[in-house]
Amino acid sequence: MKPDQKSKLDAAKPRIALPEPCSYDLEYSNRALPAYLEAVEAAGGEPVVIPLASSPEEIARTITTCSAILLPGSKADVDPQKYAAAKHPRTAPADHLRDAADELLLQDAYNLRKPVFGICYGLQSLNVWRSGTLVQHIQSQVNHAAGAKVEIAHQVRIEPDSLLAAASGSADRDCVSVNSSHHQSADVIGDGLRVVARCPDDQVIEAIEGTQPGHFVMAVQWHPERGFERDNTSANLFRWLIEAAKQWSLKSPSE
């Protein structure tokens, strides 16, 4: 790397696009959003919030200035019609504005090979967009819907040869402890994705990542934004996202 490139990389503060969590529950959305913003900022990035009421043209203009995307959690569930399934009685209402924003962000990221990081609903949204399916309501002895007040809900076993293992710093451990606030999970895995973590007690899928070399695509089912200040594993995930965004900016011809 040339000295001027290194200087640019060190000084850059990459812009990370993320949609508002939920259009139909503003109280939830306003409560959940700050943790994502703080985690991105703490890792050295500049979060750029995409209002869900934005037009496709407005979203397109905004994301051209961003080097990566972060898909946060949501109060909604992905519309099961998107993966040709009947709606389960426990499936929450879909959020069509959030779906539309996610699809625009993902299309841009995949077209330009921008880094992608999905969290909880973000994992499910990514998997369905890649033609995967979901378990609409988990039946397990493990309490995956433990909620934000439970700091450690269960263990997750991460594949040692994965990007997630390297990014989280967990390659030398069999399992890591995570929080958990979901009742759905990935089922059939989407095109160009692979499973890289499961809950060892019930085999629920806990993380997926992209299989295309050189394209950072990673999604976890837990909420690292809730613990990044005290948990180095969580903080590392955001640091890797920011580093991947910086590297993308250097390679991008528009930069």
Image (cartoon, rainbow, N blue to C red):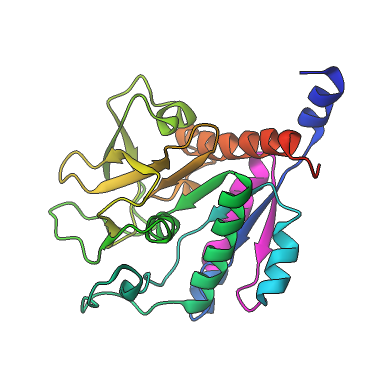
Give the position of the N terminus as an image quadrant. Answer: top right
Front residue of 90/215: it is 215
Q: Position of residue 179 (x, y in %)?
A: 35, 48
Count of residue discs: 0
Q: Is residue 114 visible?
A: no
**Residue at horizontal 53 percent and vertical 72 percent from the top:** 100
**Residue at horizontal 27 percent and vertical 47 percent from the top:** 205
State left or right for residue 33 relative to residue 45: left
Q: Position of residue 98 (x, y in %)?
A: 52, 71
**Residue at horizontal 51 percent and vertical 47 percent from the top:** 117
Residue 61, image quadrant = bottom right
State left or right for residue 54 relative to residue 143: right
**Residue at horizontal 32 percent and vertical 57 percent from the top:** 132
Front residue of 8/41: it is 8
State left or right for residue 14 relative to residue 236: right
Q: Position of residue 106 (x, y in %)?
A: 54, 57
The boundaries of the magenta stretch are 31-54
Give the position of the C terminus as an image quadrant. Answer: top right
Compared with 2, 89 (above or below) is below
Q: Position of residue 137 (x, y in %)?
A: 21, 66
Residue 252, image quadrant = top right
Magenta-colored stretch includes residue 150? no
Compared with 39, 4 (above or below) is above
Front residue of 244/193: it is 193
Residue 243, image quadrant = top right
Magenta-colored stretch includes residue 49? yes
The residue furthest right is 4
